[in-house]
Image (spheres, grey):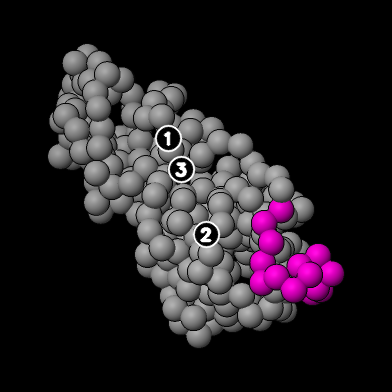
Amino acid sequence: MSLHVLKAGLLDSIQDNGRWGHTHLGINPGGAMDMVSMQTANFLVGNNGDTPVLEMHFPAPELRLESDALLALSGGDFSPLVNDQPVRVNTPVLLRSGATIRFARLRSGVRCYLAVHGGFDLKPWLGSYSTNLKARAGGWQGRALRTGDTLPFRQAADLRHQLKGAGHLALPWSAAGDPGAPDGLFRFCTGPEYDWLDAPSKKLLETSEWQVNAHSDRMACLLNGPTLRQQQPESLISGATVPGTIQLLPSGRLVVLMADGQTTGGYPRIGNIISADLPRLAQVAPG
């Protein structure tokens, strides 16, 4: 009744829809970077949308089922293999105990989500199962998964009748679309310090092409592009921030705060990417 990590991936952590209601204490919401894919994986196996899932990056982990399970993968397509046979993302799969899961190559997206029917049997921290890596709390022992870890399931499953001797069986339905293929257009609302920008910079903000920097992570998405400028050299002591806040760095570059972003900051908040578009930004690869 568990999932065993044969080999850890780049950054595998338990996430849900976030730890909301504590930002006034300096605790960020965290949660899945791509909420749409997290919920899609859950819905495919009959869970509530906020059931904790495994968020994976590529290179992804190698896993083994210690019991029968119904699971689904959504988000980035990492070419998943079950018992060395290819399976599709956005499709529920029945697996027999002992089945192995690995990921052969990166096809699209940056983050892939694994949901199991019934969810993982974990203890919440401040009302959420999400892993807060900085606080070392929540999720699985407050950290990313390591080789040898075993994640317990909340409920047992006996799928011998459905599998009929097979090691795994993909069910005949799937979710539509490819969450790992964003169209490149991101909508935003103007922020409290938007009017600090000079007129040419406001134009550049809306019309320029921006590239995700290689130093981006769960905390922030650093953007490469034209240098933006303020009308006057004003500065903040500090101001509230949320996931999606676009900040102007002293260098004139932009950074977009993501799930693990800080709750306050001193850089001008020139805009906020709308929450509907943040899951797509979370799937844009560096470069």
Q: Residue furthest bottom?
A: 148
Left or right for 108, reference 232: right
Q: Was residue 188 drawn as part of the magenta stretch in this picture?
A: no
Q: Which residue is the site of mark 2?
A: 86
Where residue 256 sits in the image (x, y, percent)?
35, 40
Query: Which amino acid, mark 1?
Result: Pro
Q: Secondary structure at mark 1?
A: loop
Q: Is residue 270 above or below residue 124?
A: above
Mark seen at residue 180 = 3
Identify residue type, mark 2: Pro
Along the viewing direction, whichever of 153 and 194 lies nearer the viewer: 153
Label 2, residues with CA under 10 Å away: few <14, some 14-19, many ≥20 = some
**Which residue, as the protein is rendered here, is positioned at the far right?**
161
Q: Earlier in the sequence, mark 3 or mark 2?
A: 2
Rendered image quadrant of residue 162: bottom right
Query: Height in image: 66 above or below 278?
Result: below
Q: Amino acid at mark 3?
A: Gly
Q: Quadrant of the C terminus?
A: top left
- Return the mark for residue 182: 1
| Quadrant assignment for the N terminus | bottom right
